[in-house]
Image (cartoon, coloured by chain):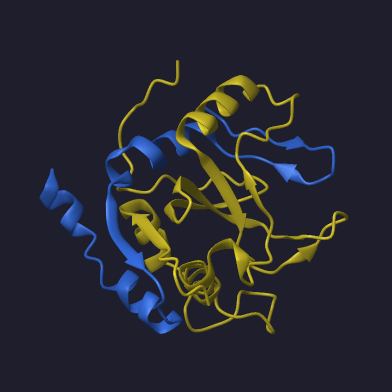
Chain colours: A blue, B yellow
């Protein structure tokens, strides 16, 4: 399914690829990798995201 | 900072994979005064965790079912976005532009699900307006939209 590209009333372009969205919301990689609770610093957030092992998703399958 | 409210952000593997590929040292090409892309995302997350939507998040934030009526996939998009409570936030990558409505928009947006008053789940980071990005290796499956 191709993305559409449509002008809104305020002139900005609104688009999202619905197929990509469905995969992002319901596909295998939509599983929660981590949950953060505030408050946190930017550096703490960065480290938390970078420390996620992406191969752990495959381990869960 | 809001003392009594505990905000939470979850992130999907898809979102984390994209985040880990972002530039974290240099400004985006052509925008030497801008912060690196990953700083824009961590600022968004940090600000939400600390203050929710009542802090200093200045980018446009809107429901993803607000689809132009002449979009050929209007009904599917509206139905899907409502069903999953989908929103998107203009994160400022590569830079912000002041819209005619007085808010800030950018080419890159974060797609998220609103899971409650104080909890969102980040699901995607995408170009907006469209540029069809290569499918990420982790994303698999052939989902039927009907």
Residue at image x 69%, y 69%?
Answer: B95
Q: Is residue A57 left or right of residue B41?
A: left
Residue A7 image point, x, y percent = 79, 37
Residue A60 image point, x, y percent = 13, 48
Residue A48 image point, x, y percent = 31, 73
Residue B128 image point, x, y percent = 64, 50
Residue at image x 36%, y 25%?
Answer: B143
Position of residue B130 relative to residue B89, above or below, is: above
Position of residue A43 relative to residue B127, above or below, is: below
Give the quarter of the image for residue B36: bottom right
Q: Is residue A39 left or right of residue A8?
A: left
Residue at image x 66%, y 80%?
Answer: B34
**What is the residue that sits farthest to the front in this orientation?**
B4
Residue at image x 56%, y 45%?
Answer: B87
Judging depth in this view, the residue of A56 and A48 nearest the camera is A48
Judging depth in this view, the residue of B88 and B55 nearest the camera is B55
Position of residue B56 relative to residue B88, above or below, is: below
Instruction: Judge whether residue B72 can be spotted in this image.
Output: yes
Judging depth in this view, the residue of B105 and B134 nearest the camera is B105
């Amino acid at each position: 399914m191709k993305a559409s590209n449509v002008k809104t009333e305020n002139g900005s372009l609104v688009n999202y690829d619905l197929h990509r969205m469905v995969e992002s919301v319901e596909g295998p990689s939509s599983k929660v990798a981590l949950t953060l609770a505030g408050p946190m610093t930017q550096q703490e957030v960065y480290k938390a995201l970078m420390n996620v092992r992406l191969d752990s998703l495959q381990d869960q399958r | 900072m809001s003392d009594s409210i505990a905000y939470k952000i979850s992130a999907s593997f898809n979102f984390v994979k994209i985040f880990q590929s972002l530039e974290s040292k240099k400004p985006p090409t052509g925008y030497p005064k801008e912060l690196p892309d990953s700083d824009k995302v961590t600022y968004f997350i940090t600000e939400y965790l600390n203050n929710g939507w009542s802090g200093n998040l200045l980018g446009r934030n809107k429901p993803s079912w607000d689809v132009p009526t002449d979009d050929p996939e209007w009904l599917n998009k509206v139905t899907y976005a409502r069903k999953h409570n989908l929103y998107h936030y203009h994160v400022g990558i590569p830079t912000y532009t002041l819209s005619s409505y007085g808010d800030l928009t950018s080419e890159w947006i974060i797609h998220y699900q609103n899971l409650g008053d104080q909890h969102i789940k980040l699901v995607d980071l995408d170009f907006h307006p469209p540029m069809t990005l290569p499918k990420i290796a982790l994303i698999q499956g052939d989902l039927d939209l009907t």
